[in-house]
Image (tube, coloured by chain):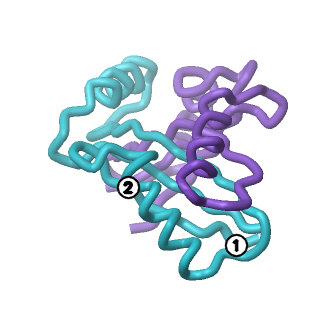
Chain colours: A purple, B cyan
Amino acid sequence: MARVTVDVMLKPEILDPQGKAVEGALERLGLAGVTSVRQGKRFDIELDGEIDDARLALVHELAGSLLSNPVIEDYRVREVLQ
Amino acid sequence: MARVTVDVMLKPEILDPQGKAVEGALERLGLAGVTSVRQGKRFDIELDGEIDDARLALVHELAGSLLSNPVIEDYRVREVLQ
């Protein structure tokens, strides 16, 4: 079994109002010195068998189309070692 | 500057309809052998100065109250090394 994690975050130049709201709340609740909070999505994917290059390439393709909006979001694919 | 990432995922026993929808879509789009997809949230937090134990303890406390719903979600706090 293979595990892959895909992180999807808004591009740095895109405003993140959810992150801003969390930033303000963290400060109000006592966490001093917060300079930035960005909120994103995370997908934990489990696959049968091994991950080869072709399969990983397909995961990248789908991460950049199905799982993220390439106009406003960046994604990162990480293989999780067992 | 210190960076902390908080991952928030539904507990394993909680149904994840968004993850299920993504699982079906990945299969339909050609990724064979997907056994599970879980969707969660990710917070990238930047802090002034260093992280000491007290500050990290506060991040844990807020991750378990503000950033996640402890009834249905688990969280994980990771310090990101620069």
Identify which residue is drawn at 32% across, 53% down: B74
The quarter of the image holding the N terminus of chain B is: bottom right
For label 1, the crowd category at 10 Å Cα-Cα, with few meaning under 14, some 14 to 19 and many 20 or more, is few
Q: Quadrant of the C terminus of chain B?
A: bottom right
Q: Is residue A44 left or right of residue B56?
A: left
Location of residue B38 in the rendering, given as x and y in whole percent from the top left corner = 34, 39
Mark 1: which amino acid? Answer: Leu
Q: Which residue is mark 2?
A: B64
Image coordinates for residue B76, horizontal then vertical, percent? 43, 60
Reading the chain from its start, which is encountered first: label 2 or label 1?
2
Looking at the image, the residue that sits furthest to the right is A13
Q: Residue at x 70, y 72 (%)?
A: B81
Relative depth, front residue between A63 and B41: B41
The chain holding disc 2 is B
Give how far across and how far down residue A37 sits, in percent. 67, 45
Asked if one can make out residue A3 in the rendered structure from this viewpoint, the answer is yes
Q: Which residue is mark 1?
A: B81
Judge by depth and name the residue closer to the eye, B4 or A33. Answer: A33
Count of numbered marks: 2
Percent from the top left, x then y, of residue A60? 60, 37
